[in-house]
Amino acid sequence: MCILTDGIMLGFALVVSMCDWKRRSISIKLLAAYSVATMICVLLDTEGKLTSIGGGIVIGALFFLISKLTKEAIGYGDSWMITLLGAYVGGKDLIRLLFTASFLAAVVSLIWMWKQGWKREGSLPFAPFLTIGLLEVICL
């Protein structure tokens, strides 16, 4: 991955994260723009990794199924973002990204529940954790 495409992907991820944090939803227009940017970045920076890109997209598609089966416990916007990130970083790095994001979300959730007196009410946006996972994949 190159610095320019990494910066574009990370910039869009930050904007999506801020929207998800504020509204607990992600705009379709923003995700469409992120999709176009992702396609351009993938075309600029494929490095012959088409099978890896395909693997990332398949993993993202599985998250759409999970979203549907769980009545959006993981929202469709998060699944869309996971698919875009999978197309960019590939399947292997997407698994690492998802592990990082899920681990951090679990830690923050436990801290939040502890502060709330162990009530299970409320939800956390997942896009900010995906962004941190992307940053980890880009930097390492």
Image (cartoon, helix red, strand yellow):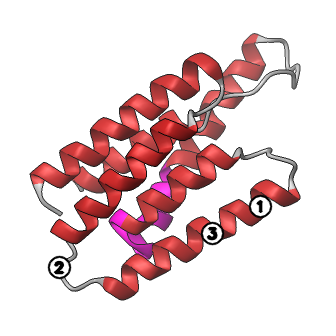
C-alpha distance separating marks 2 and 3: 23 Å
User: Where are the magenta residues, as a range?
Assistant: 88-100
- For label 1, count other residues whose C-alpha is less than 10 Å away and answer few (under 14), some (14-19) or many (20+): some
Q: Which residue is mark 3?
A: 61
**Residue occupied by mark 1:** 66
Indicate which disc residue 47 carries: 2
Query: Label 3 vs label 1: CA separation?
Result: 9 Å
Q: In the shown orientation, is residue 41 left or right of residue 73?
A: left
Q: Main secondary structure of the magenta part?
A: helix
Q: Secondary structure at mark 1?
A: helix
Residue plotted at (62% across, 20% down): 23
Q: In x, y percent, where is residue 69?
A: 87, 60
Quadrant assignment, res 77: top right
Q: Is residue 91 magenta?
A: yes
Q: Which mark is residue 54?
A: none
Does any portion of residue 36 appear in the rendered image? yes
